[in-house]
Amino acid sequence: MGIKMKTAILTAPGRIEIRESGVPEIRNEDDVLLRTSLVSICGSDVHYFSEPRVGDLELRYPIRLGHECAAVIEAVGPGVGRVKPGNRVSVEPAVSCGRCDQCLAGRPHTCRYLRFLGSPGQLDGALAEFLVMPERNCHILPPKMSWTEGVIAEPLSIGLWAVEVAGEIKGRTAAVLGAGPIGLSVCLSFRVEGGRSLFVTEKVPARIEAARMAGATWTGNPLVADIVAEILALEPLGLDFVFECCGQQEAVDQAVLLLKPGGTLVMVGIPIEERISFDISRLRRKELRVQNVRRQNRCLDRAIELIASRTIDARFMATHTFPLGRVQEAFETVFNRRDGVIKAMISIEG
Ligand SMILES: [Zn+2]
Ligand SMILES: [Zn+2]
């Protein structure tokens, strides 16, 4: 009570300021108080940072962003039994209700009453020294795992889920269109599940390099090459899967051309436009399946395990770290894709 903490607050489009606010308090029996250690900036955070309007949502300032975070448990509510003060955790940012039809059907990620960390109008984000979250949102990190790896587990879990909903991967072929952090997470996950050829396209040169580290067997830049012709020259029958990871109409069109009949288009990217169109004749003649991905469902512990055992090494994604005081510069770096940035981390403590 009366104790203050530092937070980073979006006060207007393109402007983040450090402000003080009260430390949040444990309200529910199963709440925990977390001392935030590291937060990484997600593409969706940058969306909110740069645009006063996202989809049909008109933003109202101030907003506290951030949802990819690792923290130490500082205190626990009376009903908490699984985690203890001192545990280091990766935070699952989606708080589901546990009672609606979706939650009861094992789909908490599409909960009817979902509240998301750092999503305007839902929950204040992780860019703060302290946070309160339910115990069930805290996933314990093994002792040897770094904070960086603990944070990267969250975007990696989305790649694992995208590959899981796609279907049987072993020995099959795929393209990942867009090698941002989520596209790279899909690449790592596809390879871990035994996928064979992995074609990755990306316009930013530094990310093409990263795609190779993530397991791409072929890379191409759609700005300088006809990537559809080049991939089909190598795989004349077409691909089993295409993971659309950039939210661009042009990538959706490429996906429809690249897939073999009966193939699956997995929509992972978040389009800026409200509508995307398909070449319906091709989609129908090839009987393509279109599968959307809404974040992830219960893949965070698996992501932590795969990283801890070094089955997946995703450290190359963490290209930049900024202290909380330089959060504005961190967001600008990611927004402008400056300096070969893939993921920028904000160190909250110290
Ligand atoms: Zn994210
Ligand atoms: Zn629910």
Image (cartoon, helix red, strand yellow):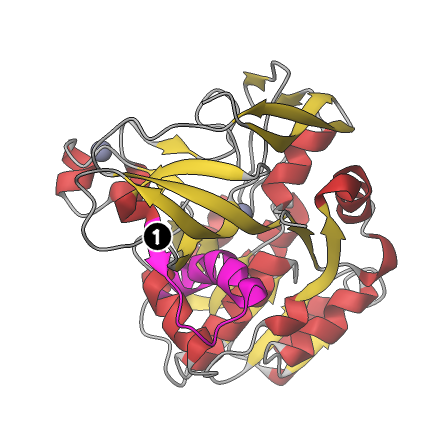
Magenta span of residues: 138-164
Comparing 219 with 191, the one in front is 191
79 or 57, which lies in front? 79
Determine whether, in the image, residue 233 is placed left or right of residue 37. right
Whether residue 50 appears in magenta in the rendering, the answer is: no
Q: Is residue 80 above or below residue 321?
A: above
Residue under the image location 22 percent in, 38 percent down: 30
Q: Quadrant of residue 158?
A: bottom left
**Quarter, ligand 2:** top left
Camera-nearest residue between 15 and 196: 15
The answer to whether residue 243 is seen in the rendering is: no
- Residue visible at 18% across and 48% down in the picture: 106
Residue 297 x %, y %: 31, 52
Residue that appears at 46% across and 72% down: 189
Give the percent coordinates (x, y) of residue 287: 37, 58
* Residue type at numbered disc 1: Pro
Residue 157 in the magenta stretch? The answer is yes
In this figure, what is the number of numbered marks?
Answer: 1
* Label 1: how many Cα within 10 Å (few below 14, some 14–19, many 20+): few
- In the picture, which quadrant includes the N terminus? top left
Relative to 37, is 26 above or below?
Answer: above
Residue most toward the front? 2
Q: Position of residue 75 (x, y in %)?
A: 35, 43
